[in-house]
Amino acid sequence: MDVLIIGPFPPPVNGMTNANNMLWEGMSKKNNVHWLNTNILKRMGNFADEGKFTWRKSLFSLVQLFKGSFKILFSKDLEVVYITPGQSVFGYMKYTPFMWAARIRKIPRYIHIHGGYFRTMYNGLRGWKKRIVDKSLRDLAGTIILGPSLRCMFEGLAPDEKIFVCENGVEDEVFATEEEIRQKIEKYKTDNTIRIAYPSNLMDSKGILDLLEAIKVLRRERDKVYLDIAGVV
């Protein structure tokens, strides 16, 4: 099968970039997999501009748009297009030309939403922006979400049978051995400390500010609260 994966790849390593990389590595073993890296910050070598508008970023985005659209429109063997758009208005809309190109060629296209903010973004759309997003969602082969509770994001926007659940995965090497797990259980058996792990980008939409407020409340009620943060600023 000839597949085109369109989305961000590492670095930086986060949920979406890591998932795309894992999918590419896994599918490449039995399929002919192409990929288009939309992570313009990696190509520019400047992660400080994340979330900011710059003309240089816009130029890189246009180059990627033409490269991906050209490949979809003129590749003879392409059978599936898999896209991981963002959940902000711009983060999603910059991927819509790829969806339209695949629709023109009648190539099945899937979008994979890594998060739970899509419906909030969609409900805030008006006018031409809403029409563009609505058009992009027509005739999708499937929408992929991270868990059953997120089906509501596409309620009324996609048929239920075209909403698929694919939970986030991790590489085999990050799993602890049974002995390591046993040692941790023994170590923390009598430990009353509340331990919280936050493995995500430090963004308001990811809930980091809500988490910090919750930590303040917990520290008023408990003596020991320990927070591990693993994410990109």
Image (tube, rainbow, N blue to C red):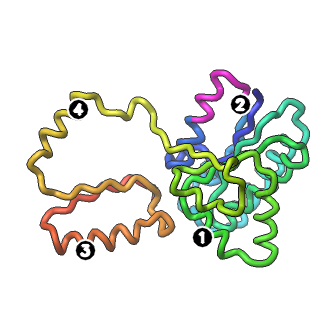
Front one among 32 and 66? 32
- What is the CA distance from the residue labelled 1 to the residue labelled 4? 41 Å
**Residue at 35% in and 33% down:** 175
Relative height, residue 121 to residue 200 (above, below): below
Q: Nearer the viewer, residue 13 or 173?
A: 173
The residue carrying mark 3 is 217
The answer to whether residue 31 is magenta is yes
Q: Residues within 10 Å of mark 2 (few under 14, many from 20)?
A: some
Secondary structure under tag 2 reads: strand
Is 25 covered by the magenta stretch? yes
Farthest-out residue, top: 30
Segment colored magenta: 23-33
Kind of residue sitting beneath label 4: Glu
Q: CA distance from mark 3 to mark 2?
A: 48 Å
**Residue position for label 4:** 180
| Dot label at residue 33 | 2
CA gap between label 3 and label 4 equals: 32 Å
Q: Nearer the viewer, residue 116 or 89?
A: 116
Q: Earlier in the sequence, mark 1 or mark 4?
A: 1
Q: Secondary structure at mark 3?
A: helix
Label whose residue precedes the other's in the sequence (3 or 4): 4
> What is the C-alpha distance between the residues marked 1 and 3?
27 Å
Q: Which residue is identified by label 1?
A: 120
Sequence-wise, the earlier of marks 1 and 2 is 2
Earlier along the polypeptide chain: callout 3 or callout 2? 2
Amino acid marked by disc 1: Thr
Tell me where residue 6 appears, x and y as whole percent. Answer: 70, 45
Which class describes the residues within 10 Å of circle 4: few (<14), some (14-19), or many (20+)?
few
The secondary element bearing badge 4 is classed as helix
